[in-house]
């Protein structure tokens, strides 16, 4: 949440900061701002709304200067407004941008007010700039003042501080919110995501938890939590294409839906040989970690949680290991039981989701035998702190609504099923069948994308609807959940998902002509049960949209529109049935005229709890 960019260079940095913010806008988009030091003065421009508002303001009144910080905000404390937008400034000297939540901000605000500081915003962040200003009265350097400041902060922060009296220096601190340093030639940059800096550098080093660094044009000095100088490994960015570009597509979401065949092909590359999924898909030493596993605990949030829910069906039925799946924000705050030989699996597109990260840390304290993350962000906190990582290689996902990340997560989890199955009760035939299914996924997804026009026409029916119900059974129930999440997230239609066997236990009461019911119906052993549930809806005057295998023998009539989905095997069916639901939510959002890529109130990377 919130995007941060900073730069110290010999040239004007406003353009670099602005381009960085545009690339980070998916992280938060309710207001944006920039502060730049020029000729000993701190100049700031902030705007409510998207980064474009700020860009227009900077066009009208440019801010020259070679040292600056910038921020795009997702509000936590204080409404979205210009006065709450970052950077925040103390006494005209210190400017600060911050990502995270300072939990003890109220107490610090009281102390600082008693010291004579006047607060100009409702944010938790503002305490940081006044604290740094105050600490500079008893410390010689900005670095020392920031080190003294962060000792007083409770909560999560990624923060960058500048001082107009020390104009060629950024001081950055990380605890709980990611920060990366970008290395240029005679210039340096910082950001909350390397994506922001790709136009200016490809060499990055991630700060570790508790690190504070001072960054000048010529050097970067990093100190650990105890103040000891440390080196953090510099790496070349692995991002091979520039994700900042929508190409021919109207929205990132559509582009990312259409990228799924390619993303799946990439995730499979080098991970299947001799009709078997290789252990090394999960890291070089994965065999050692996986061979004795008898139980899997999956932790994730949102869409990633739905991927985990689907995997539970596979791990228990096909791999022969028991599996629990839990939402990270619940797991981290309750006492749970750990079975012997348990593997903890986190699933996360961003690798920085605060609740998921906290759950991983808790699981490590609890003594899980090993930890694995299914993650799309190399170098992210989850990757660095887990024993094993399945790198999704889906390519950057910019649309807030997760699409290609979900299907690639499903593919990764199916591979995990095959590998754990091999160490437990899975036959060679089944391993072979799973490998074949995985390899044919990209082509099958391509076929499913062919439903786009039919679904665009169908979407018209939803334009005047306020509610929708999604039904599925077995491993299609999580797919129904994901379909409902997509629809509510980008079209603001209230949508709920039910395991269709649950209908008669309450939700049937909701059925009427204004409640469209979307059914996912592959041709599997639960089909006949699902058909009975469809009849229950029909008998109550419900209007249904059934995504069904062509052999499932559903017929369109007055009460039901049947959309035939390409025939597919049971291993890939959840993934294939996801595609039409993604397209449906996209087209409904288009008709409703909502902001598809940046839906209201949301952010892509949820780095606060
Ligand atoms: O980065 P993560 O996968 O950990 O994010 C978890 C959720 O915030 C995320 O999946 C969210 O639900 C999606 N943006 C919904 O489309």
Image (spheres, grey):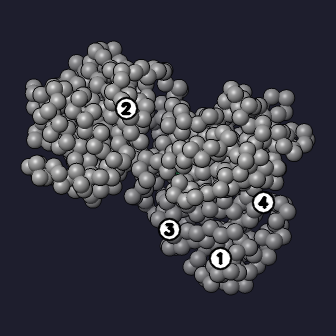
Q: Label 2 near label 1: C-beta < 8 Å?
A: no
Q: State whether residue 237 is above or below residue 95.
A: above
Q: Is residue 299 visible?
A: yes
- Alpha carbon distance from label 1 to label 2: 59 Å
- Image coordinates for residue 38, horizontal then vertical, percent: 13, 28
Which mark, residue 522? 4
Which tag, 3 or 2, sits closer to the chain's start? 2
- Alpha carbon distance from label 4 to label 2: 53 Å
Return the residue nearer the eye: 248 or 552: 552
Residue that label 1 marks: 543
Which mark, residue 493? 3
Q: Residue at x 22, y 47 (%)?
A: 127
Q: Residue at x 33, y 14 (%)?
A: 185
Q: Residue at x 40, y 21 (%)?
A: 230
Which tag, 4 or 1, sits closer to the chain's start? 4
- Alpha carbon distance from label 3 to label 1: 16 Å
Residue that label 2 marks: 225
Q: State whether residue 121 is above or below residue 222.
A: below
Which tag, 1 or 2, sits closer to the chain's start? 2
């Amino acid at each position: 949440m919130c995007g941060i960019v900073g730069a110290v260079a010999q040239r004007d940095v406003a353009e670099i900061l602005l381009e960085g913010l545009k690339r980070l806008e998916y992280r938060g988009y309710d207001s944006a701002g920039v502060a730049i030091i020029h000729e000993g003065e701190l100049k700031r421009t902030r705007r409510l709304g998207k980064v474009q508002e700020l860009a227009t303001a900077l066009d009208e009144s440019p801010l020259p200067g070679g040292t600056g910080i910038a921020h795009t905000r997702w509000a936590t404390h204080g409404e979205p407004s210009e006065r709450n937008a970052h950077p925040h400034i103390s006494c005209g000297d210190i400017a600060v941008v911050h990502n995270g939540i300072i939990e003890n901000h109220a107490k610090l605000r009281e102390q600082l007010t008693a010291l004579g500081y006047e607060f100009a915003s409702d944010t938790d962040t503002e305490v940081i700039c006044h604290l740094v200003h105050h600490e500079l009265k008893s410390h010689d350097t900005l670095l020392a003042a920031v080190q003294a400041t962060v000792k007083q902060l409770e909560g999560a922060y990624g923060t960058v501080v500048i001082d107009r009296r020390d104009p060629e220096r950024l001081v950055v601190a990380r605890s709980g919110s990611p920060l990366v340093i970008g290395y240029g030639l005679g210039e340096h940059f910082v950001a909350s995501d390397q994506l922001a800096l790709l136009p200016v550098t490809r060499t990055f080093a991630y700060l570790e938890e508790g690190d504070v660094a001072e960054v000048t044009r010529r050097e970067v000095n990093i100190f650990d939590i105890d103040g000891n100088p440390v080196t953090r490994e510099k790496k070349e960015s692995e991002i091979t294409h520039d994700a900042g570009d929508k190409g021919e597509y109207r929205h990132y979401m559509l582009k990312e839906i259409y990228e799924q065949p390619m993303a799946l092909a990439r995730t499979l590359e080098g991970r299947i040989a001799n009709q078997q999924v290789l252990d090394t898909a999960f890291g070089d030493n994965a065999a050692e970690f996986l061979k004795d596993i008898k139980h899997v605990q999956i932790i994730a949030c949102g869409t990633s949680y739905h991927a985990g829910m689907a995997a539970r069906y596979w791990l228990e039925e096909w791999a022969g290991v028991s599996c629990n799946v839990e939402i990270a924000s619940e797991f981290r705050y309750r006492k749970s039981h750990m079975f012997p030989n348990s593997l903890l699996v986190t699933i996360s597109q961003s690798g920085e989701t605060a609740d998921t990260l906290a759950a991983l840390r808790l699981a490590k304290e609890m003594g899980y035998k090993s930890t694995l993350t299914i993650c799309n962000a190399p170098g992210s906190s989850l990757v660095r702190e887990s024993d094993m990582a399945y790198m999704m290689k889906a390519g950057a996902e910019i649309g807030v609504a997760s699409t290609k990340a979900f299907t690639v997560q499903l593919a990764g989890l199916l591979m995990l099923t095959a590998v754990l199955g091999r160490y437990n009760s899975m036959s060679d035939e089944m391993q072979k069948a799973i490998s074949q299914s995985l390899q044919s996924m990209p082509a099958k997804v391509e076929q499913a994308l062919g439903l786009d026009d039919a679904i665009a026409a169908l979407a018209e029916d939803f334009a005047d609807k306020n509610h929708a119900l999604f039904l599925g059974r077995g491993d299609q129930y999580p797919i129904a959940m994901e379909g409902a999440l997509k629809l509510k997230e980008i079209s603001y239609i209230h949508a709920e998902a039910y395991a269709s066997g649950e209908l008669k236990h309450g939700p049937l009461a909701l059925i009427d002509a204004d409640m469209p019911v979307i059914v996912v119906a592959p041709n599997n052993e639960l089909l006949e049960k699902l058909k009975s549930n469809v009849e229950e809806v029909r008998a109550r005057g419900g209007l249904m949209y059934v995504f069904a295998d062509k052999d499932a023998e559903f017929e369109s009539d007055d009460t039901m529109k049947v959309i035939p989905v390409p025939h597919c095997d049971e291993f890939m069916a959840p993934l294939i049935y996801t595609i039409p639901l993604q397209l449906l939510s996209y087209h409904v959002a288009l008709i409703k005229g909502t902001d598809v890529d940046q839906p209201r109130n949301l952010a892509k990377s949820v780095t606060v709890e």
